[in-house]
Image (cartoon, rainbow, N blue to C red):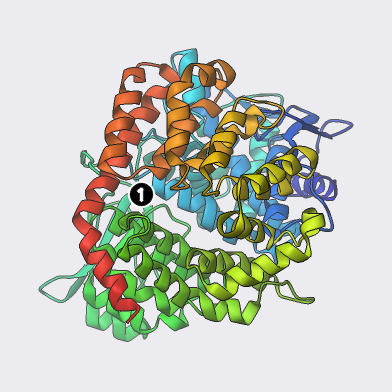
Amino acid sequence: MDIAKRAIEFYEEFYQTKYPLPQSLQLALPDFSAGAMENWGLVTYREAYLLLDPDNTSLEMKKLVATVITHELAHQWFGDLVTMKWWDNLWLNESFANMMEYLSVDALEPDWHIWEMFQTSEAAAALSRDATDGVQPIQMEINDPADIDSVFDGAIVYAKGSRMLVMVRSLLGDDALRKGLKYYFDHHKFGNATGDDLWDALSTATDLDIGKIMHSWLKQPGYPVVNAFIDEDGHLKLTQKQFFVGEGEDKGRQWQIPLNANFDAPKIMSEKELDLGNYKVIREEVGHPLRLNIGNNSHFIVKYDKTLLDDILSEVDELEPIDKLQLLQDLRLLAEGKQISYASIVPLLTKFADSKSSLVINALYTTAAKLRQFVEPDSAAEKNLKKLYDLLSKDQVARLGWKVKAGESDEDIQIRPYELSASLYAENVDSIKAAHQIFTENEDNLEALNADIRPYVLINEVKNFGNAELVDKLIKEYQRTADPSYKVDLRSAVTSTKDLAAIKAIVGDFENADVVKPQDLRGWYRGLLANHYGQQAAWDWIREDWDWLDKTVGGDMEFATFITATTGVFHTPERLKEFKEFFEPKINVPLLSREIKMDIKVIEGKVNLIEDEKDAVNSAVAKAID
């Protein structure tokens, strides 16, 4: 309620346009397929995105709930007061609300550093999804009602679209943005608008041709990698080319790229190639390593040649947290796209392990998690990887401990979950023991466990000390509690079981709405699928009971995400073959068609990457722990 009230007041002032209704009601629904819905004056939410325990909710969950509320309230202007003319301009609603949710929470709760969450969630999702050939552009033609649901691609229309608007904001500045938005609302309120109407409105406040810049991003799928290199004449050159993870057809696309360089370079790169002059002269003049996309606000990645990258790495400790995140992010994507070797990233990980920034720690473990695809469960290579995880996490776990302390910084509160999770994956004996002791001390009131450590205590207990009886007890607890955050923790723990009898019982509850509501089913399915011991049972269930799933959630945007969730886990030739056998016959279902085609490419890309890189990566890990 506090966030909702202050958000409406913030938007009235920022948009310089009054909220035109006498009330704004926020309503939680017990089973709701969308995350939330911006009905004018009566916003509806899943319980998990509105209800929380004010005394025991993790900071991450508070941030998430706040951004959902501010997203829906941003829609009261962008979507309700002014509505898109047709579905091809869906981004005009969703991309803008997605950016504004962060802009408003940042104003309401500046200590939360909410833009860091934007970087680790929206930016990461957009870069990952948008690198697959066949992805939709932000703005696409809609000629059939069946196409409408398929256009609601969260990583594109929401995440990538909001990244585009963050780019626009950084080009314009807030004063010009607000002036342009006031013009837009004044001219279009209680009516319909197109993207070009927005660009025309913003152009009243700037000399930049915003429409021209944005059309190259909205109407084309994908994004560029900018190659920065020193040629044989000693000149610093930049080239742009579409970036792909997996197979991709290069169609010669070009973008208007805001370079955001930390040296003298054009504001916008519209050419395929730029010659910026003598590198040594430029480097001497600026006195620091040369970098592009400062702040990570533009939708491209950078591939530096060895000279430029070594220069950056030589002063890596001087970089801001966002710059360290961007460095790891770009290297990780380049490795996914087979433009560099994953093995070359492994030695860099220890450079970031002692960071006091949750942003950097997030980037570190996002990268480390990718290494898991190169090892077989319980193999010698996995044992080495677990030792690397222990090396990365043990000092931080020792520094922070398992119990939250009074007066801790928000950064430490947010770093702890990453480190505890890594330590448990590493099978660190002290962590397993500490978590077990906390569970034992709080067994009669698990809900009261501190929410920041609760999921890891529960997961540890189920994995290392659990049996079917404990799983059954936690499922009953899941049914009993009304706290949505606690439910998520219980689900994470239950689906991580190694007990085959428990796994069978969990799958048996998938279609029992008294235990698992249809809105929550994908989380249960994915949790069990990602568990080596439960994967076969979950995969068998979805194939055998697909018709039931279709009847239950088939008319909904949620339906295709079961395929995406499967793709996120699968990475072996055997699973690729099974995936194709099952989903290819469904390729003509309008809601599923694009997802199936893209996801086959995604899994194929992972299979090929692992085949090419496995030995080198595992050797690099073995070397890192020596």
Note whether residue 262 is visible. no
Q: Outermost residue, left direction?
A: 232
**In the picture shown, does residue 391 fall above or below 8?**
below
- Residue flagged by tag 1: what amino acid is it? Gln
- The residue singled out by tag 1 in the image is 256
Secondary structure beneath dot 1 equals loop
Circle 1 crowding by C-alpha within 10 Å: few under 14, some 14–19, many from 20: some
Drawn side of residue 393 relative to residue 176, left or right = left
Question: At which x and y percent is residue 153?
Answer: 48, 34
Residue at left offset 73%, top offset 49%? 486
Residue 167 screen position, x and y as percent: 49, 52
* Screen quadrant of the C terminus: bottom left
Q: How many marks?
A: 1
Judging depth in this view, the residue of 523 and 118 nearest the camera is 523
Can you give x and y, in whole percent of width and height, for residue 210 in the image?
A: 47, 45
Q: Please state, as top left, top right, bottom left or bottom right, where the N terminus lies in the image.
A: top right
Quadrant of the rendered image containing residue 438: bottom right
Residue 74 percent coordinates (x, y)? 70, 40
